[in-house]
Image: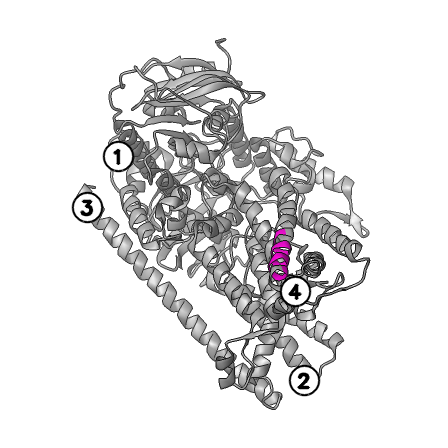
Amino acid sequence: MSASQEQNVARVVESETLKLERQKRRASLLRTVGLFVGLVVLLTIVNLATHGNFLQPGNVLNVLRQIAVNAILATGQTLVIITAGIDLSVGSLIALTGVLMAGTVNAQQSVVLGMILAALVGMSVGGFAGFINGLPVVRFGLPPFITTLAMMLMARGSAFLYTGGRPIEINNSAFNFLGSGFVFPSLGHLFGIPGIPMPVIIMLVVVIAGSYVLTQTRFGRYVYAIGGNEEAARLSGINVFNVKLAVYVVSGALAGLASLLLAARLNSGIPQSGQGYELQSIAAVVVGGTSLMGGRGSIGGTFVGALLIGMLYNLMNLLSIQSYAQEVVLGAVILAAVLLDQLRRQYLATR
Amino acid sequence: MTEQGGPGSGNSPDGAPFLSMHGISKSYPGVQALDGVSFDVRAGEVHALVGENGAGKSTLVKVLAGAVSADAGEILIDDKPVVIRSPKHAEQLGIAVIYQEFNLVPSMSVAENIMLGREPTRGTGIDWAALRTQATAAISQLGVELPLGVEVRRLSVAQQQMVEIAKALSTNARVIVMDEPSAALTTSEVAVLFEIIRKLKASGVGIVYISHRLEEIFAIADRVTIFRDGKLVKTDVRNALTPDDVIRFMVGRSLSSHFPTLPQDPPREHPLLAVRGLTAPGRIENVSLEVYPGEIVGLAGLIGAGRTSLLRAICGVDHFTSGSLTLNGAPLQPRSPHEAIEAGLALVTEDRKTQGLILGMTIRENVTLPHLEDFVRNGHIDRRKESTAVAKLAAELRIRTPSLEQIARNLSGGNQQKVVLAKWLLKKAKLFCFDEPTRGIDVGAKLEIYELMVKLAEAGAGILMASSELPEVLGMSMRIAVMHKGRIVKIFGRGESTQEEIIRYATGTIAA
């Protein structure tokens, strides 16, 4: 093949590739539209069933605010799970960073300084815990299930030791604003609500930034590569050690941030808080279509997963379903969602 | 079945086929994998199936194994039409398939693996005595020794293959399909495999033998069927064909030579790579070697002789305890593959599926992985720039794919290997370390890869190529280093060696 022929072939392959990419984008747009239409129909039915309460702007914001903590946790969890790992420690880290932040806030005279210091303490302690989670995984090849299980116990115990088992009340208006405050009041007045809750803003920033990093940057590509085939990734010159360690640090730091929102909302650091949150975050990730085997998934999907779970809880509350029954329903919905996703993949693979 | 071929007879037994397939078609999105193919197997014959990667051999095997169902066509067993519904059903019908990647449970014993899924029971538990008896019976049919109680992962590849064959026999298979059975075997192990195949023939089992190695096919097959682009182009008795015929049918043209003409030896003044006393205990011992710019150096040796370990140590994958490396006269101490790549080294690994590719990623994403930093603009990856660069390479290497967005898993072996090569051609490396560059790929793709090596050498790159195929080492090397037990025992200049001599050094029959 001559050089000019090669160029021609290259041009054809390139244009075919771009065409296919366009087709794929169009197909995914179509799927999104389909999902959206389905969602609208479902929401309408739900709205009728709840006598119009479900879609009240106040209730919608309520749902978003309630899922903020889980969506932030699940964003970090998604990164870890795409590398074929898991982080069981995030629930306990909420408790540990929460009580430490409460202690920090209360030790400061200045309201603003206290808030800033507390946020720094929360996220760096979380990040450090993530580092401790990840180090034995990358250095000695321990299973992440074990290291993060150990951290789950250690962090929970430390939270109780620090407070002697009692909650620490927080009296700092700037700090509490992060959990309970509203911004953009003029936007809110249009819908008859006080504004957009701070936790919702923070959650959206985290989800959008996380999604950008995962889909558009080298780091994100490396996360997928490591989850897909760690050995091939290493031989391709990827610093597997750093990338894997980083996902645990990010997951821990985001647990610190989620804890900040929770503590600020409850005006206290509570050593019992965050129990079971690690499983809630994993549920959001898998309902969002991320594979526990690694190499596949998205933060956008995880956000939808967290939203679905949050809406389901809210709906059941509006319908006055008792909380024990809610757990049963939620379990069944998680199973059904992941099963449907699996069947869809099998269908696409055989077509 | 009324007639059987004579034991060990070189000619085709002319009995009625035990199994025959007529007009089998199967298509996947964008690919007609099989197009009206007919194929049959008689009792006691070895029927070789050859064709380039993507010619449809694997699809035919999957249809036979009950792993996929054909879109059209019929299958007859003993002249009665059957529908093969599942792998289990195929087994019940007397069809056993031995894949390249074995279906064994590494942590279970030989006996447990042979009887897996068919464990004899007594009461509610497994009847271990009966299990061992039945496993022993299957092994003794092969006429080989296998330790019944040893975990399969402790066995050599050749022994694992024997376990697979014993497992097939224990299901009373009447047709055994062997997909590239010799790919990971040494010469003497292949000889043992052929002994076993001859015994199976004698007992009336039909064998479908798939291989890229024509010399094996001409050594063992009774009949040969050649596929090209999903169609059957020829079925004939082996004696009616020559190797050149087979190649012509496979690629649709005649290949003038299996190897390209090598350029002149470069001047050996300043070595590109100099290895001095490299030692990694238990793997390589005191290895010294130079590669000059524009030179192709072959590394010969038996499996386990340390060829792969040497390449991995040079390329920063494994650590060495003593010795030194220099690249263009400057000391080189790669502590990771990343540092080696930065220094201008490229390691084309031997196993593309486990080491070369992220199978779930697209061609584009795989190729740019080692040099992703070159495609980042303002903090994000420029996909268009990726597509442009990869499309150029794909055309140069003739990667056959409708799009660069194809997932690597869906490509044929030859195309997968080209994607691996493209990874390392994206940015021209100074030194290429090839480990078994053409394992399991077809003749046409092989020649393309050889031509590429020559091009790289002509452009001044150094090439170190480890290979188990002696013709390849002889045909492609300007110098040949023979390894034995972790040491380089002999370095031949161009034209100074023969296959026999290399084997003598590689097996240690000549002391260094």
Task: Count the numbered circles shown.
Answer: 4
Q: Quadrant of the N terminus of chain A?
A: top left
Packing grade of label 3 (10 A; few <14, some 14-19, many >=20) is: few
Residue A155 drawn at (x, y percent): 72, 53
Q: Amino acid at mark 1?
A: Leu
* Labels 3 and 4 positioned on one and the same chain: yes
Q: Nearer the viewer, mark 2 or mark 1?
A: 2
Q: Amino acid at mark 4?
A: Gln
Q: Nearer the viewer, mark 3 or mark 4?
A: 4
- Above or below B222: residue B381: below
* Labels 2 and 3 positioned on one and the same chain: yes
Packing grade of label 1 (10 A; few <14, some 14-19, many >=20) is: some
Q: Which residues are magenta?
A: A114-124
Pointers 3 and 1 in contact (C-beta within 8 Å): no
Pointers 2 and 1 in contact (C-beta within 8 Å): no
Residue tagged 1: B255
Pointers 4 and 2 in contact (C-beta within 8 Å): no
Q: CA distance from mark 4 to mark 2?
A: 22 Å
Q: Amino acid at mark 3?
A: Gln
Residue tagged 3: A5
In the image: residue B491, left or right of residue A130: left
- Above or below A113: residue B398: above
Pointers 3 and 4 in contact (C-beta within 8 Å): no
Pointers 2 and 3 in contact (C-beta within 8 Å): no
Secondary structure beneath label 1: loop
Residue tagged 4: A280
Residue tagged 2: A319
